[in-house]
Image: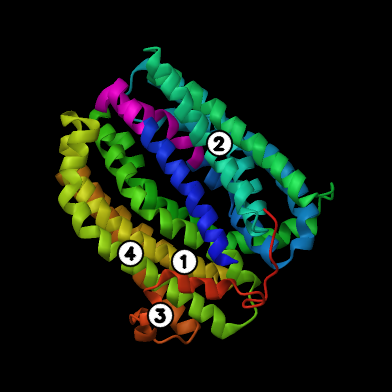
Amino acid sequence: MIVRNVRLILSINVLIVFSGVVTSLLGAWALGPAGRGDLLVVVLWPPVVALLAGLGLPQAHRYWMAKEPERVSSLFSNAIIYAVVAGGAALALAEMIVPHLVGQRSPEVIMLVRIYLINIPVALMLDLMLGLLEGSRRFGWAGVARAIFFGVQALGFLALWLAHKLSVESASLTMIVCQTSAMLLSIFAVRQQLHPAWQPSWTEWRRSMNYGLRDYAGIVSDFTTLRLDQLMLGAMASSAAIGLYVIAVRLSEITTMAAGALSEALLPELAAARAGNCTKDLLGRSLRLTLYSHVLLLVPLLIAAPLVLKKIFGERFLPAAPALRWLLVAAAVWSAGAIVISGLKGLGYPGLSTIARLASAGVTVVGLLVLLPRLGITGAAIASLIGYSVMFVVALFWLVSRQQIGLWDCLRPRRRDIPTLRLRSFARPGFLGAQDQQI
């Protein structure tokens, strides 16, 4: 079943990336580097605040829904209550703090920053609902809820661009509509697919928090490693530099689609598994295939990076080429690390994955403080690469030591890994003791 789930997630991720490319192109053409940077400043903080307010509960829901799906009513009811209470409190706090964290911006941009913060409780609710859907392996519905944000955004940007009305303000308001649409669809999907009753439970909430808090520091660290470069640029750099960097980031993230899909499908599959040798085989093969694919793609992408920027986005974005090359290497390392991190969490070791991500975040912070002032956006890209490398190495150490997997056995190329169709062997009924799910 993991093969079907990976294909489904990957298909949706392709749609999301395609929509993201459309919005990036339209935004770059209409707004230029400076306007694109202002838009990033506006939309950057709500997902960060929502992640902090979540306290690891979305990941806990994903784990417990895979392991004990009969808990859905309590998990759903607690999620609704938590999103309303914690989301409202986070919004009030963010209104006081976030406008002081975006550097020297125009009054219009600061106003849009304040307005866009309304997405905080909406984003928190979406994260909690997606945890329930993905934990129950309803990846189709979860993917549609994710994709509608990017799909509506792409259509909205296109309509505004054709009408010559695409601005930072109209783009921000469009994204508020997109976020709300995705949240409402996710609630509908949970109700329609999982049929939860209204059963709030303090005991279940504490149990979920026990898992979530063990993984929380790692979640924050993971996000720090992934997005701290943009947060610091948002506070320190010019809008033009931010606009260049975000385009480089978006392009590099295209190469992580397959690994992202595989890591999302891997966690619930391992959490529901019963056979130790099968889980080791599944983890090892997933990691090796991820490494192989990036090795094959990396060299031609590094050569073509300046040409892609010039031909697609225009010469104004050509200065982003050095940062893009470093970010492409960083994306390859992140992809391998994502597989190992997902494996640790799916096997019930969120604390060990947290250690890896904390180490990564610490190194990333130091790297950014040293390299960003000296090398600008290229320094930010190098710092990201260093942070991802630390995460991968530390996480792999914990995995091989706790699961008693030899490092060479885990990474050694095997002939059976090359034909990817052999992954279908993992989908044989009963191979992992998992029941097929309707999506």
Tag 1–tag 4 contact (CB < 8 Å): no
Disc 1 versus disc 4: distance between alpha carbons?
Answer: 19 Å
Q: In this view, does 207 lie to the left or right of 7?
A: right
Work out whether mark 4 precedes mark 3 in sequence or the reverse, and give the earlier one. 4
Tag 2–tag 4 contact (CB < 8 Å): no
What type is the residue that disc 4 sits on? Ser
Residue 284's place in the image compared with 331, above or below, is below
- Residue 33, how many percent across, how many down? 25, 28
- Residue 310, how many percent across, how many down? 17, 35
Foreground label between 4 and 3: 3
Residue 78's place in the image compared with 282, above or below, is above
Residue 5's place in the image compared with 305, above or below, is below
Give the number of the disc on residue 293.
4
Work out whether mark 1 precedes mark 4 in sequence or the reverse, and give the earlier one. 4
Q: Mark 2 points at which residue?
A: 148
For the residue pair 246 and 360, the one nearer the viewer reads as 246
What type is the residue that disc 3 sits on? Arg
Q: Mark 1 points at which residue?
A: 341
Which region shows up in magenta? 24-47
Q: In this view, does 420 lie to the left or right of 276?
A: left
Q: What main secondary structure does the magenta stretch of the protein show?
A: helix
Task: Inspect the magenta stretch and tell me whether residue 372 lies in it.
Answer: no
